[in-house]
Each structure stands twice: as structure tokens, then as C-alpha cells.
Image (cartoon, grey):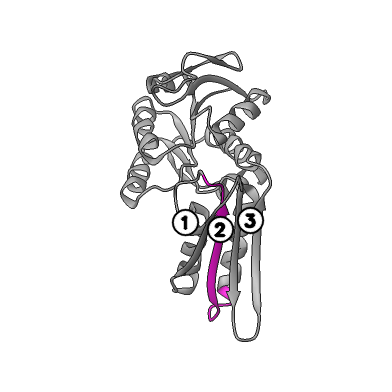
Amino acid sequence: MIKLAISGCCGRMGSRITELALKDRDFKIVTLLEKKEHPKIGSLLGGIPITDNPEEIKNADCLIEFTLPEVTLEHLKVVLKYRRAIIIGTTGLTNEQKSKIVEASKNIPIVFSPNMSIGVNLLFKIVKETTQALRDYKVSIVEAHHIHKKDVPSGTAKRMAEIVKEFSGKEVSDIKSIREDEIIGDHEIIFDSPLDTIKLIHSAKTRDIFAKGALEAAKWLIKKKAGLFDIQEVVEGRLS
């Protein structure tokens, strides 16, 4: 049984990860974290007390982190201190912050991905193949999320743009971000030429696709000693 710590347990993602983990016999939640002065600090969630003390991460085998960049980096220090595994789904990280994750991965196992959805990671693979076949096409991206999402564009949109640049050598300068209502996450990448237009679309119906992906990643990562991995490696590893 994997002893699990969940950061931001009362948030949109954290609450779904917590609920699904409570129903999964492969996990025992030992630590639920929230920010200092959160109104739920000290209360119980699924019979587990909510704390604002990151040192409690030491009781877990793995931490799942879907919060803010600054919080993620602070918790990374604790994970590194106690040599625990960590799943990072936080977006909006700077290159400098990402470099700290890369450095930490030399000593601990980390899964770091802008999107934990299996479907989205299949989309990444298709974007790669499409880019390789349509190098001369103009590429644009449209992403839509709920009004509470702070990073613009989304981490998923940035990753698609990175794939296009890597396999075509061209920057994607046209990325449109929409923040409306309670949209879970919609992504569309358009390949356009004078002759035709090809659109690849993924639409998330529930946050559970990300939560389930994170939990699958934890099951896979716990067997690793150190290294930096993404969700595509998790999917391929669990299928092999």
C-alpha cells in the first residue's frame, strides 16, 4: 500500500485526487496539506486531519502536488530532504523553477507533466506525428479554461507549441486563451494551408481524468529510485 500525501487537498484538483484515492485500495492517505490560514486547517477530510505543516510529507511515500509554483518549490525542498517521490501537475512554472525540478530529479523520482490526462498525452503524440507530416502548415492553438485558472496560456498549450517547434523548427505565435465560466479544459490545435485545414481537439468533461492520471503516476513512480519522467512514460510503462 502506498502512503500518500496530497497538497492543496481542498482545491479543485486536490479534492478530486483525495476522493479517488480514498476509494483506491492501493493507497493510504497519511497527509493532507493546505495553505496556512486556510479555513479547513485542523478539520477532517475522509477521517484525515488537514494540516499546513509541510514537514508532515515525511510520513508519505509520495506527494501529489497540483498547486502554485511557489508552493510547489517549497514542498519540493521537503520531498528532497526526506527522499520521497513526487507527482507535479502544477503549471505556470518559470524556466528557473523547472530547472530546480530537474536538479532534484537527480536524487528523487519525479513525474512532471503539464497535463496528467491519458487522452491529452495521446494528443501530444498525434501532434508530433502531424507536425512531422505537415511541416509547411501554419499552426495555431486555442485553449479554454475556467475563470479561476491563473496561468496563460495553459501548460498543455505550451507543451503542444514546444512539440511543434521541436519537430518543425517553427514557433507557434498564435495561441488564444479563453477564461470563461467553469470550463474544465479544452484544447484545439489547427494546422492550416491554402489547400486544407486539420484540427485536433481534446475536451475534458471532468477533472477526474487528471486525478486518475496522477494516481496512476504515483503507482508507477513509487518503484523508481530517481529520475525525471512525464505521464507518457507512465502510460507506456504500465501498458508494457
Figure disc tally: 3
Circle 3 or circle 2, nearest the eye: 2
- The stretch of residues the image draws in magenta is 132-147
Tell me the kind of residue under disc 2: Glu
Local crowd size for mark 3, using a 10 Å CA cut-off: few (<14), some (14–19), many (≥20): few
The residues bearing labels 2 and 1 have C-alpha atoms spaced at a distance of 7 Å
Residue furthest out toward the bottom: 194
Pointer 3 or 2: first along the chain:
3
Residue 117 vs residue 176, the one in the foreground: 176
Q: CA distance from mark 3 to mark 2?
A: 17 Å
Q: Is residue 149 above or below residue 13?
A: below
Q: Could you say which disc has been placed on residue 122 in the image?
A: 3
- Please provide percent x and percent y for residue 43: 52, 14
Return the residue nearer the eye: 226 or 61: 61
Furthest toward the left, the residue is 96
User: Does the residue at mark 2 contact the one at mark 1 (Cβ under 8 Å)?
Assistant: yes
Q: Which residue is mark 2?
A: 143
Please indicate whether residue 95 sits to the left or right of residue 183 in the image: left
The residue that disc 1 covers is: 153
Q: Secondary structure at mark 1?
A: loop
Q: Is residue 12 left or right of residue 205?
A: left
Q: Are marks 1 and 3 in contact (CB under 8 Å)?
A: no
Q: Position of residue 133 (x, y in %)?
A: 59, 76
Q: Position of residue 1 (x, y in %)?
A: 60, 22
Q: Earlier in the sequence, mark 2 or mark 1?
A: 2
